[in-house]
Image (cartoon, grey):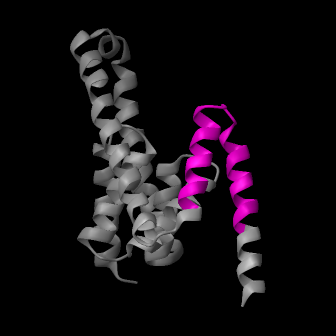
Amino acid sequence: MDTKKLWKMFTSMFYLSACTFGGGYVIVSLMRDVFVKKYHWIDDEEMLDLVAIAQSSPGAIAVNGAIVVGYKLSGIVGVAVALVATILPPFLILSIVSLVYDAFIANVWIRWLLEGMQAGVVAIILSVCLDMGIPYIKHKKYVSMLCFGIALCANSIFHIPVVWIILCGMVFVCLEAIFQRTKK
């Protein structure tokens, strides 16, 4: 077991989890920056696959993302390391905030700070969408882009629950795989 790699993974996940505001999609994009661009432990295609697995699994995407990345990098030990590193910072932060919650929530400066962070979170999520979508455009995966557009419209315009969209996507991918096999 490569303890240096495990330690780098732990410190990276801990840092990302401690310093990321805005939810799981933000931390997933930052995981990509660290593990794909900085350390080159995972390539872009694998990261997209891992994010898809994390999104389709029940639970928080930040935790699911840590689990799949940890497993990819170091198996079960990697899962344990990534999980502890991802869960520990919010646990500690929330434990401390709970002690001073009344004073914290009443402070107008903190409330404004948190509201201002929302704009940054939107920008990061948009960046993730572009980073994940550009390979599909480059490789001319028009069917995937069409499915994305249909899913986006189904949820945002027609308010179809995401779970139904995911299930339909799974059926579509299975049918596409069957079609590809019969074509060979």
Q: Position of residue 173 (x, y in %)?
A: 69, 66
Q: Position of residue 123 (x, y in %)?
A: 30, 40
Q: Is residue 91 magenta?
A: no
| Image quadrant in which the N terminus is located | bottom left
Q: Is residue 99 left or right of residue 55?
A: left
Query: In the figure, 92 relative to 100: above or below?
Result: below
Q: What residue appears at the point 78 percent right and 85 percent down from the top-left corner?
A: 182
**Residue 35, image quadrant:** bottom left
- The reply, left or right, for residue 164 in relation to residue 63 is right
Quarter-wise, where is residue 152 in the image?
top right
Of the pair 25 and 108, the residue shown nearer to us: 25
Q: Left or right: where does residue 117 sit relative to residue 77? A: left
Q: Is residue 57 visible?
A: yes
Is residue 7 visible from the viewing direction of this image? no
Residue 56 coordinates in the image, percent (x, y): 62, 55
* Front in this rendered view, residue 96 or 172: 172
Measured as percent of width and height from the top left, residue 96 is found at: 34, 29
Q: Give above or below for 71 relative to 169.
A: below
Residue sitting at x 53%, y 73% = 76
Chain part drawn in magenta:
144-173
Total number of numbered discs in the rendering: 0
* Outermost residue to the left: 109
Pick the residue in front: 28 or 149.
149
151 versus 181 height, above or below: above
Q: Main secondary structure of the magenta part?
A: helix
Q: Residue at x 32, y 70 (%)?
A: 36
Give the camera-side residue of 89 and 133: 133
Residue 170 inside the magenta-drawn segment:
yes
